[in-house]
Amino acid sequence: MKRIITTLLASIFLLTACSRAATATATPLPKEAPAIAPVFDRTFLNECKNCHTDKQRLIDTAKPVEVVEKESSGTG
């Protein structure tokens, strides 16, 4: 019974030691957030669709099939 309690207390100690310490003060937010222009372009989505639906483009860009030799062949 003593061993179970000791193990339980040790595991609680280890788990609380790994947790983040709570800060008493909050970090102030900046008064004005910088304006960020949107970078997303819808033509990118079209290019994905065009590439994945064009059979010849898929064939041209596909990785060639390599012939793999058996490792168990030969003397050994």
Image (cartoon, rainbow, N blue to C red):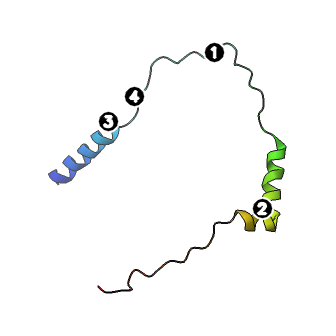
Residue nearer the viewer, 42 or 31: 42
Q: Position of residue 76 (x, y in %)?
A: 29, 85
Disc on the earlier residue, 1 or 2: 1
**Badge 1: residue crowd in 10 Å (few <14, some 14–19, many ≥20):** few
Looking at this rendering, what residue extends furthest in the left direction?
A: 2
Lower sequence index among marks 4 and 2: 4
Is the C-beta separation of discs 3 and 2 under 8 Å?
no
Residue 16 locus on image (x, y percent):
34, 37
Q: Which mark is residue 17?
A: 3
Instruction: Judge left or right: residue 53 versus residue 20.
Output: right
Secondary structure found at label 3: helix
Viewer-nearest of labels 4 and 2?
2
Residue on which disc 2 sits: 52
Identify the residue at horizontal 54%, vertical 77% (top origin): 67
Instruction: Say which amino acid is labelled 4.
Output: Ala
User: What's the distance in space between the residues labelled 4 and 3, CA to CA?
Assistant: 9 Å
Q: Which residue is located at x 80 percent, y 67 percent?
A: 56
